[in-house]
Image (cartoon, rainbow, N blue to C red):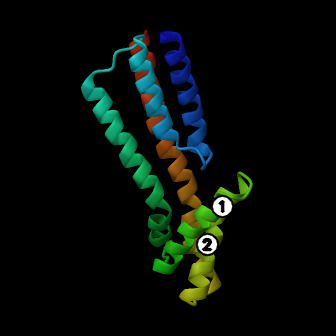
């Protein structure tokens, strides 16, 4: 049983890191599940505090990742319509081939939202949409940072 849990832990960690880049996979929750499998396997014993802290970090990062696109769109001068457009574009982008959909979905959504509902000039709308585009990379960075932190913590406890 320990070997099966160890295999599940490794698979979850690998798929979790891939999920930081692939928008259809929840990276931090999968990596956290890998930590739990590793803990239950008996190969590593995480303290209760570590499991709670990593669980809270995972939840916060997952929620922040959901809202980072509209937030960055607004930081770059976008309106509420641009933020909603970026959020809708992000969801639509999930169904378009990677990496084109996730990269361009929020950008196009924010651009459409700004142009249709705020009647902004093209330069201002593109500037706001650029914030949505950058949010994709910021989200990846945050998720990778957390997932790698969990993995490094587990490796440290193994050795």
Q: Name the residue carrying label 2.
A: 109
Q: In this view, does 76 lie above or below 39?
A: below
- Secondary structure under tag 2 reads helix
Q: In this view, does 54 lie to the left or right of 77?
A: left
Quadrant of res 105: bottom right
**What residue is drawn where x is 60% and y is 49%?**
24
**Marks 2/1: CA–CA distance:** 9 Å
Q: In this view, does 15 lie above or below 119?
A: above
Pick out the residue farthest to the front.
Answer: 1
**What residue is drawn where x is 59% and y is 33%?**
15
Query: Does the CB distance between marks 2 and 1 fall below 8 Å?
Result: yes
**Which of the pair 106/6 is nearer the observer?**
6
Observer able to see residue 120:
no
- Quadrant occupied by the C terminus: top left
Percent position (x, y) of residue 55? 35, 37
Percent position (x, y) of residue 67? 44, 61
- Secondary structure under tag 1 reads helix
Dot placed on the residue nearer the N-terminal end, 2 or 1: 1
Q: Name the residue carrying label 1.
A: 93
- What label sits on residue 10 in the rendered view? none
**Which of the pair 20/129 is nearer the observer?**
20
**Which of the pair 118/66 is nearer the observer?**
66
Badge 2 density bin: few <14, some 14–19, many ≥20, Cα 10 Å: many
Percent position (x, y) of residue 83? 50, 72
Observer able to see residue 127:
yes
Pick out the residue farthest to the bottom.
Answer: 119
Q: In this view, does 112 lie to the left or right of 156?
A: right
Badge 1 density bin: few <14, some 14–19, many ≥20, Cα 10 Å: many
């Amino acid at each position: 049983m320990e070997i099966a849990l160890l295999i599940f832990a490794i698979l979850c960690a690998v798929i979790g890191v891939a999920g930081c880049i692939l928008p259809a996979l929840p990276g931090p929750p999968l990596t956290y599940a890998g930590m739990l499998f590793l803990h239950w396997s008996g190969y590593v014993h995480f303290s209760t505090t570590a499991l709670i802290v990593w669980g809270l970090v995972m939840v916060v990062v997952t929620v922040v990742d959901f809202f980072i696109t509209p937030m960055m769109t607004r930081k770059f001068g976008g309106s509420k319509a641009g933020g909603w457009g970026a959020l809708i574009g992000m969801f639509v982008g999930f169904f378009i081939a990677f990496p084109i959909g996730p990269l361009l979905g929020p950008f196009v959504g924010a651009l459409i939202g700004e142009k249709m509902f705020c009647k902004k000039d093209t330069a201002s709308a593109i500037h706001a949409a650029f914030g949505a585009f950058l949010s994709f990379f910021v989200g990846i960075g945050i998720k990778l940072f957390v997932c790698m932190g969990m993995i490094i913590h587990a490796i440290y406890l193994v050795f």
